[in-house]
Amino acid sequence: MTKHLRMSSIALAGGILAATLLAAAPAGADTASHASPAGCWKAQVTEGDMPPAEVELTFDADRTLKLTGPRDENGTPYFTGTGTWAPLSGGAFRFTVRHPLPGGPAGEARSSLDGELSSTRAFSAQGQTYHHYDDGTVGGPSTVTMTATRVSCV
């Protein structure tokens, strides 16, 4: 085999490998890892005895996250929040999020959750939320649960 033919074969094999890896990446995943929550999600969240709420989460590759709370009839979110996340082993991850308390006394909800990917397109999480009020009091903890489905990032 000539040197030119060997180099062409290596380049072709590398191109096939790259195409295979790109095709295997789930939609919306900015990092091509199947064991990563990186990307965009719609989630149903239940806290304590409150009715479920639909939220949007974006787990960024830099291990920060953005939360968009439930939306009103005009599409405006009741709140937005931020947080961080860290991968664990086997599709597990841990994340924290903070957001203003909607309605009622002024304050901030602070949640810490343990999540687990059940596939490249779904995860569930559970944890605790504390309510930190502006008057210095703290309420909680209350149990928070979440089920999420991966969506395309817009």
Image: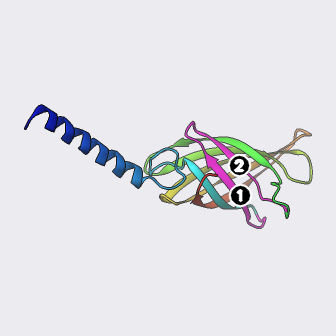
Q: Nearer the viewer, residue 24 or 116?
A: 24
Q: Tell me the tag on residue 55.
A: 1
Q: As drawn, is 94 to the left or to the right of 81?
A: left
Q: Residue at x 29, y 48 (%)?
A: 16
Q: Residue at x 19, y 42 (%)?
A: 9
Q: Tell me the tag on residue 129.
A: none
Give neighbour class at mark 1: few <14, some 14-19, many 20+ (Cα, 10 Å): many
Whether the magenta-drawn stretch holds residue 150 is answered as: no
Task: From this view, report whether residue 137 is shown above or below residue 3.
Answer: below
Q: Position of residue 21 (x, y in %)?
A: 37, 49
Q: Position of residue 38 (x, y in %)?
A: 54, 47
**Which residue occupies the extreme bottom position in the image?**
51
Does label 1 or label 2 sit earlier along the sequence? 1
Name the kind of residue labelled 2 in the image: Leu
Whether the magenta-drawn stretch holds residue 64 is answered as: yes
Q: Secondary structure at mark 2?
A: strand
Dots 1, 2 in contact, CB < 8 A: yes
Q: Position of residue 77 (x, y in %)?
A: 80, 54
Q: Position of residue 89 (x, y in %)?
A: 44, 46
Q: Residue at x 85, y 61 (%)?
A: 74
Q: Nearer the viewer, residue 37 or 98?
A: 37
Q: What stretch of residues is rendered in magenta?
A: 49-72
Q: Tell me the tag on residue 67.
A: 2
Q: As drawn, is 137 to the left or to the right of 90?
A: right
Q: How is the image coloured?
A: rainbow
Task: From this view, report whether residue 75 is shown above or below residue 131.
Answer: below
Q: Secondary structure at mark 1?
A: strand
Name the kind of residue labelled 1 in the image: Val
**Which residue occupies the extreme top position in the image?**
3
Q: As drawn, is 86 to the left or to the right of 135?
A: left
